Image (spheres, grey):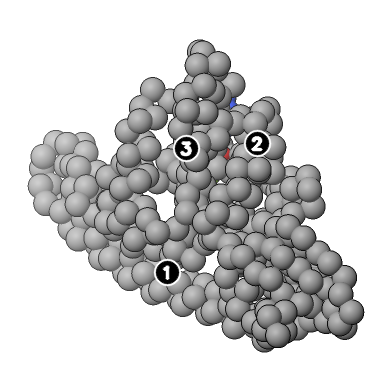
Amino acid sequence: MEYQLPRLTKMWTHLERQAGGKVKGMGEKQIEVDKRILRTQIGVLKKELESVRKHRKQYRNRRISVPVPVVSLASTYMDFLVFEAVGYTNAGKSTLLNRLTGANVLVEDRLFATLDPTTRRVQMKNGKEFLLTDTVGFIQKLPTTLIAAFRATLEEISESSLLVHVVDISHPLAEQQIEAVEKVLSELDVISIPKLTVWNKVDKVSDPQKIKLEAEMKEDVACISAFNGEGLHEFCDAVQGKLKVDSMVWVEALIPFDKGELLSTIHQVGMVARTEYMENGTLVKAHVPPRFARLLTPMRQLYIS
Ligand SMILES: Nc1nc2c(ncn2[C@@H]2O[C@H](COP(=O)(O)OP(=O)(O)OP(=O)(O)O)[C@@H](O)[C@H]2O)c(=O)[nH]1
Ligand SMILES: [Mg+2]
């Protein structure tokens, strides 16, 4: 609508032309009316956007502050491993989400098919899980008014553990699109979040072998086709590897036998290197998400003592 506002004039000049120029100014009045309607609608939408933002924020806060109910431990802690698929519009983010989770997210060969973030649980073949959020695509020179409109969505990005930057590597302007996305990411101040780059649509390039070799040479780049599933296992492995290095901490803890559910959560959200049954509990050595590590503090002390 903000885009439309200054362009209304052009829409109405045809009226004057039709009337043979006799009623000059007739279009002009209509423009004023239209502008007022648009401004009112913009105001209403802005208010709604603000309330969406507040709502999402509350929701996120609640996710973080839940006082650890034992039964839902697993699903609660899952939230600490939120993965965000970011990328240029039409790069294949939604296709990737669908392919990994069997979700039914709208996929379309057009810009901005996705306007609302969708989060799904991804189950990897080794039983590990993570949450993957699909978001709105980026474009070059994202107008500031659009940034405002998508702010609620973009804010989700800043709270994820890993960003997966999906690139349409078959696109002739892939290089520029990568740059555009990196630029938006830096504007969002999320440079510190670990990132994995995915070159998607490798089935569509003229020389897949060359592209795959190129990807191999680079650090943190996985080559896939969300379309036919090629490279997805490697992608999941890369996600896990990245996590271990960048967003997990090493813990050694003694889990009392009556806290068995904690043990299964560690297996689910973390990467267990070793378990050993002791007299007073299970000794676990594993990489786990930092937040979870903090919760294990008493049990880590138990191990030390
Ligand atoms: N050939 C080929 N086409 C793909 C692949 N992945 C996605 N596509 C196609 O690319 C188009 C865009 O896919 P989407 O998943 O909607 O892209 P998106 O990144 O979610 O786009 P926005 O929601 O607009 O940001 C669709 O026509 C997909 O079928 C792939 O690996 N190979
Ligand atoms: Mg999409």
Q: Is residue 243 left or right of 27 when viewed as pictured? A: right
Q: Quadrant of residue 83?
A: bottom right
Q: Residue at x 55, y 74 (%)?
A: 60
User: Residue 273 placed where, x, y %?
Assistant: 73, 57
Judge depth for marks 3 and 2 and give the one in front: 3
Label 1 CB less than 8 angstroms from ligand 1: no
Q: Residue at x 59, y 21 (%)?
A: 203
Of the 4 image quadrants, the one containing the N terminus is bottom left
Asked if one can make out residue 200 in the rendered structure from this viewpoint, the answer is: no
Mark 3, secondary structure of its residue: loop
Q: What's the distance in space between the residues labelled 3 and 2, CA to CA?
A: 14 Å
Instruction: Determine crowd level at label 3: few under 14, some 14-19, many 20+ residues with C-alpha closer than 10 A.
Output: few
User: Residue 23 placed where, x, y %?
Assistant: 12, 47
Circle number at residue 234: 2
Q: Is residue 100 above or below residue 169?
A: below
Label 2 CB less than 8 angstroms from ligand 1: no
Q: Is residue 183 above or below residue 38?
A: above
Circle number at residue 219: 3
Q: Residue at x 52, y 56 (%)?
A: 246
As rendered, which of 60 and 5 lies closer to the eye?
Answer: 60
Q: How many marks?
A: 3
